Image (spheres, rainbow, N blue to C red):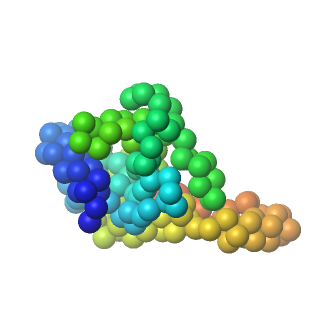
Amino acid sequence: MSTVEHLLLAHYRDAAQRMGDIPLYNAALEVELVAWQLLDQSGAAGILVTPWCVNLLWVPLNQVDMPVKGEPCVLALESGEYEGVCAELASVGRYGSAALISDTSVMIDHEQARALANEMAALIFAPAVAHEAQASEALAQGKPENPQRRALFRRALGGAQ
């Protein structure tokens, strides 16, 4: 585990101890960083699972690439652009956080949350070639551009598949 990963986990685990009484808190979930990985030469990113949300987090190598805390920021990947908010920790510096799931109360247990986070990571961190081929095929068939992504988010929100 990298130092940045360890510091982010420590921060969110500490926050989890203080947030247990919020209505969206799902005590069946734990704080975990899923699919944390290096992004070329630009930094690192992964999916954060907490008892109250599932977010895409990214930490750039170069802090000047991030706006000030509280301002919008964007992570540009081959799969698309992910807009979030710039956060800051003294131990980590500035990092981006984009909400993927804001209400985890529909999740049964942590294994379900982890599996969903891994599915999201597979879509978010997939190479562009796979996305372009899938989009072309879907458009040729008159289907939505990314049906797996839509189905994934429907499942996350407790809707039909």
Up-down: is 7 above or below 36?
above
**124 or 151: nearer the eye?**
124
Of 63 and 76, the residue lying toward us: 63
The residue lying at 59 percent from left, 49 percent from top is 76
| Residue 48 seen in this snapshot | yes
* Residue displayed at 59% across by 62% down: 149
Picture coordinates of residue 27 (x, y %)? Answer: 20, 54
The x and y percentages for residue 97 are 42, 43
Horizontal side, residue 83 vs residue 36: left or right: right
Residue ranking furthest to the right: 140
Snapshot quadrant of residue 118: bottom left
Q: Quadrant of the C terminus?
A: bottom right
- Answer above or below: position of 75 versus 3: above
- Residue 59 position, x and y percent, is 40, 48
Q: Is residue 107 left or right of residue 142?
A: left
Q: Quadrant of residue 68?
A: top left
- The location of residue 73, given as percent across then percent down, is 51, 37
For the question of whether residue 157 can be seen, the reply is no
Horizontally, residue 131 falls left or right of residue 106, namely right
Residue 37, above or below 96: below
160 displayed left or right of 142: left
The N terminus: image quadrant: bottom left
The residue closer to the viewer here, 54 or 141, is 54
- Give the residue drawn at x 29%, y 53%: 4
Number of numbered labels in the structure image: 0
